[in-house]
């Protein structure tokens, strides 16, 4: 059996292994394969949201915010139990969302690598979500965050136009 890699972090000079289990919050950026502009159509995004919801249920995660930019997905995910495992959650989601788009795409959906960062306790979900929702404005895809239709939350109610 292949041993899972765990991150090592230092707290007060003591090295601790981080195994991605538990009720942690993560800021995750998942680039599309070869930076292709896949997420420009609402129907494509809906076909990826269904596997995301299913992976959340299966692995006990909440999505506090998500934003589909043309070439990436940015989201805040939080484990809901001590058994929630972020790497397994993402593995399930990446495989099932790739399968959902397999008939449409003639290449992999996701890049091999993704970025993740554990959010600190003092970082508010709403503040980080607000930053995510401003990404389409920075990318000049919308004039205001609330004008961009390819973002949302499985937890928060978002203001409507």
Image (cartoon, rainbow, N blue to C red):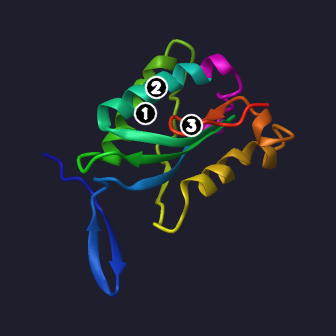
Q: In x, y percent, where is residue 32? A: 58, 37
Q: Earlier in the sequence, mark 3 or mark 1?
A: 1
Q: Earlier in the sequence, mark 2 or mark 3?
A: 2
Instruction: Give the number of the disc on residue 123.
Output: none
* Rendered residue at 57%/42% (across/down): 65
Q: CA distance from mark 2 to mark 3?
A: 18 Å
In the image, residue 37 lies in the stretch drawn in magenta: yes
Q: Secondary structure at mark 3?
A: loop
* Rendered residue at 56%/40% (across/down): 156
Question: How many C-alpha atoms fall within 10 Å of the one at disc 3: few (<14), some, or many (≥20)?
Answer: some
Question: How many C-alpha atoms fall within 10 Å of the one at disc 2: few (<14), some, or many (≥20)?
Answer: many
Q: CA distance from mark 1 to mark 2?
A: 5 Å
In the image, residue 124 lies in the stretch drawn in magenta: no
* Rendered residue at 72%/47% (across/down): 135
Outermost right residue: 143
Q: Residue at label 1?
A: 94
Q: Residue at label 2?
A: 97
Outermost top residue: 103
Q: Is residue 8 above or below residue 14?
A: above
The quadrant the N terminus occupies is top left
Q: Residue at label 3?
A: 153
Q: Is residue 115 above or below residue 39?
A: below
Q: Are marks 1 and 2 in contact (CB under 8 Å)?
A: yes
Outermost left residue: 1
Q: In x, y percent, where is residue 141? A: 81, 37
Q: In x, y percent, where is residue 73? A: 58, 39
Give the residues drawn in magenta, as a range. Answer: 32-44
């Amino acid at each position: 059996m292949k041993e899972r890699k765990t991150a090592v972090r230092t707290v007060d000079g003591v090295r601790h292994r981080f195994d991605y289990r538990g009720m942690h919050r993560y800021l995750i950026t998942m680039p599309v394969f070869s930076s292709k502009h896949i997420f420009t159509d609402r129907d494509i995004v809906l076909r990826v949201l269904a596997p995301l919801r299913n992976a959340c249920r299966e692995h006990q995660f909440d999505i506090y915010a998500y934003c589909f930019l043309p070439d990436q997905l940015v989201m805040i995910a939080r484990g809901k139990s001590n058994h929630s495992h972020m790497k397994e959650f993402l593995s399930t989601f990446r495989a099932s969302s790739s399968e959902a788009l397999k008939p449409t795409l003639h290449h992999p959906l996701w890049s091999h690598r993704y970025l993740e960062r554990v959010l600190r306790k003092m970082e508010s979900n709403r503040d980080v979500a607000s930053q995510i929702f401003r990404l389409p404005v920075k990318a000049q895809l919308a004039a205001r965050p609330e004008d961009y239709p390819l973002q949302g939350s499985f937890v928060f109610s978002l203001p409507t136009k």
